[in-house]
Image (spheres, grey):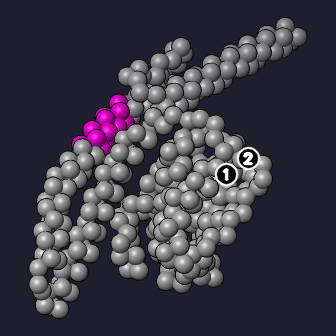
């Protein structure tokens, strides 16, 4: 009886050891699949997932994931090609439209020198305003495609957010003064340093300030914090929460910003996220606040 008991214990022990080894190998295979899948998603490679395990089920799982990876790669290539073609098309259209627009502006200038009636002068004003808006849209489209094309290759240097913010405000001094806006600026005495692209950061600040000029009721408060967060806030009674929620969408504009192309904040969002930052907007009690953060 004791012999059979020892035999049974031995068999159970062997089964447990076998199951432990099996579980270990399955966990190892699952870890290999997880790591390989994450690597394939992050890198541009044609290499598929391969396993060291010979377990049939795990190899079937890897084969199924490889099928999805092939499909994902095809979709990614198609998207990249389509995106590139779209950017090239927009760039070409922008260039092609500049010549006739320049000619239109020239003829409008000549018309201004001719004797015209009050009605004709009014019509010319409308044509000039619309032509200027079209020129601005073309320029923004061109800048957007350039920013999108070069966003992946932004060289970074250690810069002080304080200095770039001051330079951006100086560049918009005339526009702010023309709208009778005297910005209230608050920033720490100590330099807030980050590894960023200076030109891209200047573009971000410039687009946000330009947005404030469009919607502000006459005020602008800018607060730079030591943690790398910058807050631009101003009273904007013409906006509502729904409009603010769409402000970063491409080509979205509101009726009160007739000269806007709807690309400024979209470009700011793209560049901010490309440099590892975040940007968002909030509307509360008639005050529009745009938050930009660059953590360490």
Crowd around label 2: few <14 · some 14–19 · many ≥20 (10 Å)? few
Asked whether residue 252 is drawn in magenta, I would say: no
Q: Is residue 197 left or right of residue 150?
A: right
Q: Which residue is mark 1?
A: 162
**Residue 159 drawn at (x, y percent):** 63, 41
Q: Which residue is mark 2?
A: 191
* Residue 83 - label: none
Residue drawn where x is 54% and y is 49% of the image: 201
Asked whether residue 84 is drawn in magenta, I would say: yes
- Which image quadrant is residue 119 in? bottom left
The first of marks 2 and 1 along the sequence is 1
Which region shows up in magenta? 70-86
Residue 20 visible to an observer of this rendering: yes
Distance from disc 2 to disc 1, alpha carbons, whole Å, reads 6 Å
**Residue 93 drawn at (x, y percent):** 19, 52
Quarter of the image with the C terminus is top right
What kind of element bears circle 1?
A: helix
Which of the two residues, 78 or 187, is positioned nearer the viewer here? 187
Crowd around label 1: few <14 · some 14–19 · many ≥20 (10 Å)? many
């Amino acid at each position: 009886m004791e012999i059979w008991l020892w035999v049974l214990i031995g068999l159970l022990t062997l089964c447990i050891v076998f199951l432990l080894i099996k579980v270990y190998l399955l966990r190892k295979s699952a870890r290999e699949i997880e790591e390989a899948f994450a690597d394939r998603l992050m890198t541009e490679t044609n290499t598929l997932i391969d396993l060291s395990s010979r377990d049939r089920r795990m190899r079937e799982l890897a084969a199924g994931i490889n099928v999805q990876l092939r499909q994902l790669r095809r979709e990614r290539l198609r998207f990249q090609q389509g995106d590139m073609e779209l950017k090239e098309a927009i760039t070409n259209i922008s260039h092609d439209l500049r010549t006739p627009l320049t000619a239109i502006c020239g003829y409008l200038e000549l018309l201004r020198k001719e004797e015209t009636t009050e009605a004709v002068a009014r019509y010319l004003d409308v044509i000039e305003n619309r032509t200027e808006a079209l020129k601005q849209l073309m320029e923004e489209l061109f800048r957007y495609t350039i920013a999108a094309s070069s966003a992946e290759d932004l060289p970074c240097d250690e810069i002080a957010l304080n200095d770039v913010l001051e330079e951006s405000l100086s560049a918009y001094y005339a526009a702010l003064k023309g709208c009778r806006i005297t910005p209230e600026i608050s920033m720490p005495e100590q330099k807030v340093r980050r590894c960023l692209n200076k030109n891209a950061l200047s573009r971000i600040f410039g687009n946000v300030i330009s947005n404030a000029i469009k919607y502000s009721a006459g005020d602008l408060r800018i607060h730079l914090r030591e943690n790398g967060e910058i807050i631009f806030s101003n009273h904007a009674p013409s906006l509502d929460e729904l409009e603010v929620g769409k402000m970063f969408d491409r080509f979205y504009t509101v009726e009160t910003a007739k000269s806007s192309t709807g690309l400024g904040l979209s470009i700011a969002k793209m560049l901010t996220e490309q440099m590892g930052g975040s940007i968002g907007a909030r509307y509360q009690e008639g005050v529009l606040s745009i938050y930009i953060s660059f953590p360490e």
